Image: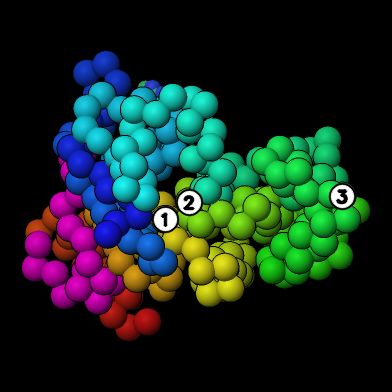
């Protein structure tokens, strides 16, 4: 059984048909990466999976419940089970690292302060930044900010983590770091990871399965290896011959 089951999802902005009868299953415990041209609807799909936008047609099931018609109040409950690393890893600049990471714990649980402190410390350790509770967002490098944002997203130990362009704006060392971290969390927290990226190298390195969106639909899905072997013209054109050779060699 799929954790998320997306059927016939349509999303239109004016005359722009972004998702056009999209079907997708996401399975528990996998790292699945959604790839596609810029503007192909990857971020919109993630937002639909979190109930942050309304879809025009189709259904989304999460853990066997139809959620696409859920009320805002119900979505608030559902979202507690999903951590999200947004494209702009916006931290609250007026809050310390401690308060940033503690945020969802305060909002969503009634943990006593002692326990919050323990969970914050443990989560910062998990992202490789132990002991920086007293620092402020302004003191952090881009890579550190991203990792604190990730700590904030997983502080409540969600079952599923969404990553929208986790490599965006990071130098190669931090891209590698964030990718390792994602895989580490996968192992230590046993989460389901849904990644959106246009960084093909990263996608190939971290994913159990790739999903290619084109013209509002899923046109191909499979292991990274199967994408490299694919004879499908859409897949081949998306990856490109040069990148294909780079990926085959790596
Ligand atoms: N709030 C919005 N209003 C109108 N159009 C939007 C809105 N959000 C996204 N779009 C359009 O939807 C399409 C898909 O966007 P998006 O999902 O962000 O693409 P990407 O695959 O790059 O993440 C784009 O054409 C974008 O302009
Ligand atoms: Mg996007």
Secondary structure of the residue carrying tag 1 is strand
On the image, which quarter does residue 182 sit in?
bottom right
Question: What residue do we see at 68% from left, 54% from top?
Answer: 155
Q: Which mark is in front, 3 or 1?
A: 3
Query: Which mark is drawn over residue 194?
Result: 1
Q: What residue range appears in magenta?
A: 214-232
Query: Which mark is drawn over residue 113?
Result: 3
Give the camera-side residue of 154 and 134.
154
Question: What residue do we see at 21% from left, 61% from top?
Answer: 221
Tell me which numbered mark, 3 or 2, is placed earlier along the sequence.
3
Asked if the residue at label 3 sits under 8 Å from ligand 2, the reply is: no
Q: CA distance from mark 2 to mark 1?
A: 5 Å
Question: What residue do we see at 88% from left, 55% from top?
Answer: 114
Tell me which numbered mark, 3 or 1, is placed earlier along the sequence.
3
Where is residue 52? Give x, y as percent.
45, 31
Secondary structure of the residue carrying tag 3 is helix
Residue wearing tag 2:
162
Is 193 positioned to the left or the right of 138 in the image? left
Tell me which numbered mark, 2 or 1, is placed earlier along the sequence.
2
Quarter of the image that includes the C terminus: bottom left
Q: Is residue 218 magenta?
A: yes
Residue 72 visible in image: yes
Q: Is residue 220 magenta?
A: yes
Where is residue 54? Give x, y as percent.
36, 25
Give the camera-side residue of 161 and 226.
161
Is 191 positioned to the left or the right of 5 in the image? right
Question: What residue do we see at 36% from left, 36% from top?
Answer: 67
Where is residue 200? Give x, y as percent.
36, 63
In the image, farthest residue toward the bottom: 249
Secondary structure of the residue carrying tag 2 is strand
Other residues around mark 2 within 10 Å, as few (<14) / some (14–19) / many (≥20)? many
Where is residue 160? Give x, y as percent.
48, 55
């Amino acid at each position: 059984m799929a954790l998320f089951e997306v059927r016939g999802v349509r999303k239109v902005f004016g005359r722009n048909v972004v998702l056009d009868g999209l079907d997708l299953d996401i399975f528990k415990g996998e790292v699945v990466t959604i790839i596609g041209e810029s503007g192909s609807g990857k971020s919109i799909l993630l937002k639909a999976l979190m109930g942050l936008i309304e879809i025009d047609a189709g259904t989304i099931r999460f853990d066997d419940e139809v959620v696409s018609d859920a009320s805002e109040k119900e979505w608030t409950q559902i979202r507690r089970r999903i951590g999200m690393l947004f494209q702009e890893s916006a931290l609250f600049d007026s809050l310390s690292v401690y308060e940033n990471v503690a945020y969802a714990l305060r909002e969503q649980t009634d943990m006593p302060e002692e326990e919050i402190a323990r969970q914050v410390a443990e989560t910062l350790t998990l992202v490789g930044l132990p002991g920086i509770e007293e620092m402020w967002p302004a003191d952090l490098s881009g890579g550190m900010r991203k990792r604190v944002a990730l700590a904030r997203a997983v502080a409540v130990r969600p079952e599923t983590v969404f990553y929208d362009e986790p490599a965006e704006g990071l130098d190669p060392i931090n891209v590698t770091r964030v990718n390792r971290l994602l895989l580490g969390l996968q192992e230590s927290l046993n989460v389901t990871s849904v990644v959106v990226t246009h960084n093909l190298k990263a996608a190939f390195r971290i994913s159990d399965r790739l999903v290619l969106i084109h013209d509002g639909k899923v046109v191909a899905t499979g292991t990274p290896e199967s994408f490299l072997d694919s004879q499908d013209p859409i897949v081949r054109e998306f990856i490109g011959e040069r990148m294909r050779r780079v990926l085959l060699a790596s």
